[in-house]
Image: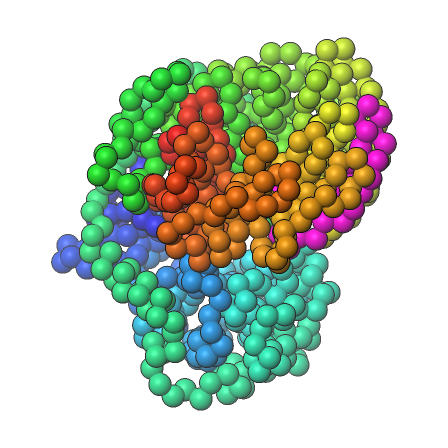
Amino acid sequence: MPTPLTHDDPVALGPYRLVARLGSGGMGTVYAARSTGGRTVALKTMHAAIATDPAARTRFRLEVDAARVIGEQFGARVMDADPLARTPWLATEYVLGPPLDEAVEAGGPLPEQSVRVLGAALCSALGRLHRSDVVHRDLKPSNILLTAYGPKVIDFGIARAIGDDRLTRAGAAVGTPAFMSPEQATGQEHDAAGDVFALAGVLVYAATGRGPFGNGQAADLLYRVRYAEADLSGVPAALAPALAQCLVKDPAERPTTAEFAARLHDGTGDFADHLPHALIADIGRRASDVWRLVPQRLPAPAPGPEIAAGAPAAGRRPSRRGFLALGGALAVAAAAGGGAWWWQKRTPARGGGTTAKVSARRTRNIEPLWTYTFGTVLQADLGAVVPRAVGGTIVVPTGGGTQGVSPASGARKWDSYFEESSWQTLVADGRLYRLSIGEETDDGIGSAVTLQTVNPENGKTIKTLARFAGTNDELPTHQLLCVTNGVAYVVAGEGKYDGGGTFSAGETSTLRAADIETGKLLWSKPLPVRFELSTTLHFLAAKAVGSRLVTLQQVTDETVHVVVRAAATGVVLWERPYGIDDPDILRGGIAADSDHLYLGGSRLCALRLSDGAVAWKTSTEQAYGPPELRADTLYTVGDGAGLTAVDARSGKTLWTERGGEVAEASTAWPPVLGTRYAYYRNGTLLRAISLSNHTTSLTYRTSGRQFYADAYAKLVLGVDSQNLTAYPLQ
């Protein structure tokens, strides 16, 4: 979705005046722009910090060349380019159609005939590249735009000539793990057969809504791509054999693009004739929306009390850690510093918080109150940034520096060099805690991990509460699970840090409990050893409930168990597997009371905390997202049902939302509860459901994927890979 320009964006490049931001990644930013004659184009630029690298400039020039090779039939037509400019740029036609991933997310998997005609057209596109001895190397759903006339392949940032490895470091895996070929995943030669493998993966996604090797962390995906069989469940039976042949591990056994196309479709009919009506309607809507784009530019942020806006924190050094457990192996860090912010006018509310001044006539598609763009660009799975709201500040730990953000305006208040990630910070009883992450040393042997309290007004350490002997604070894998009744529960790692954003060779971890008043270690229990380069943290969520420590533990890289321990000793009281396709959705927290743990999944269920037995479960099989508990009522999002309220004591459905379209209701996160509304993502909107009449009262435009409550400031905070956005919590 287009967003306003920031104060840092240029006014124009070449003959094109910038209108809006379309997106940003590790290499650069893409804008909507207009020529002096009024033509709207997509204009891609290179980040200034990267433009000084000759190799990066060469990659940009090769991207321009590859975009010209594929031509306007199968790609976005190149209008103009200047790869030699101080800020290199590339202007292409503004393609009127959604990316494949957005189309599937909005409308669900495509019908078999749509998948077949899409695949045949993409075979033709890749065939044109391959005949010019060029391979794409990063074919994935987000790089395929769907128009009424056929798909267009974009983003040739890592494309290169077949056999030319001058810009690829030996042994490096370059690309997107979920759609890599096995040879690419091991840093070997990726030729035309590798593109065929990726294309088959894209078609599995189009037909099922998921990739052939599932979800998860980068290292997990790379392992499955290399060694596991592709999961074709859900693929139409008549289509599965053709895709399976393309997904074999040996590139010599895969068909050519021409052979693959012949098995997919005979080429009759227009492309649009084979698309679902909803997708055609979305293409038409985007065609009309492009003319409504008007230039908007955000004001420059005011300097914070300690650091001038845009300046990096003193003493900060680049981190090698990246972002563990949430795609960290492929995370790309941009220049550290403050973020962009903008807001709508707000007025004070009763109780010390704030609410948005929203026109009574505007109840749909409302813009966020403000948006804060992280000082670090995350090309990672969502959850790498969890905002911690405390004491009138929203603390944003990114793993490459931590910022304090004003809840009133979204402006940055402070910036620190501390490199803790979200899983190393938390707020409990109005206090902000963090585990210390030390600076990297040449020998990889740091100091003991410490637990600290932090001043949320400036990010500075108040007091060290506990020191965990024998640990190494350079390791990025420590976790601060919870602090309850004066006890902190921590995962601490031992061993030498080898410089990656993953588990290190020989690293071991323990689950520990420490008294935060005395610093005394109460108990320590060993945890399973992670294999080298694993990016899967040990715990997804934890909560101390009475005398028990309730955890959702990833016992292996692909297996989640509910593990309940005695809080006083760490002894496991009971354990049972929890089958779930996407473990990351469990990071939103644990719903439990003194007697039961409540879980989503194919059925909503309650487990007795005493022994793990099922107390109740819903009678029909239906996907439910993680629930939120309030006053004996569970609130969850049901697939095809939307927001659902369930009696926590009996499992009886109390009500479901009424009168709204629920086909796009997201079950990937718990709802956020206010006093009047419950909030959850539905398509591209944050929907506010009235808790009294169970209908949609308000909708907000959102790019957020995960949502959190700031009860003090009365805000719903949305997080995506680049931004923190705020909405009224009512």
**Does the magenta portion include 576?**
yes
At a point 34% along the width and 20% down the height, the residue shown is 349
Viewer-closest of 666 and 521: 666
At a point 63% along the width and 23% down the height, the residue shown is 434
**Does the magenta portion include 168?**
no
Compared with residue 304, is residue 646 higher up or lower down, i.e. above or below?
Answer: below
Answer with the quarter of the image where residue 326 lies.
Answer: top right
Residue 512 lies, in percent from the top left, at 79, 27
Residue 577 lies, in percent from the top left, at 76, 49
Residue 230 as seen in the image, left or right of residue 70:
right
Residue 125, visible in the rendered structure: yes
Here the colouring is rainbow
- Magenta span of residues: 561-587
Residue 47 as seen in the image, left or right of residue 169:
left
At a point 24% along the width and 56% down the height, the residue shown is 289
Residue 636 lies, in percent from the top left, at 54, 44
Residue 311, visible in the rendered structure: no
At a point 23% along the width and 34% down the height, the residue shown is 359
Count of marks placed on residues: 0
Residue 346 lies, in percent from the top left, at 29, 25
Identify the image quadrant of the C terminus: top left
Compared with residue 236, is residue 605 higher up or lower down, i.e. above or below?
Answer: above
Residue 390 as seen in the image, left or right of residue 481:
left
Compared with residue 620, is residue 631 higher up or lower down, i.e. above or below?
Answer: above
Answer with the quarter of the image where residue 232 lies.
Answer: bottom right
Viewer-closest of 501 and 646: 646
Residue 618 as seen in the image, left or right of residue 313:
right
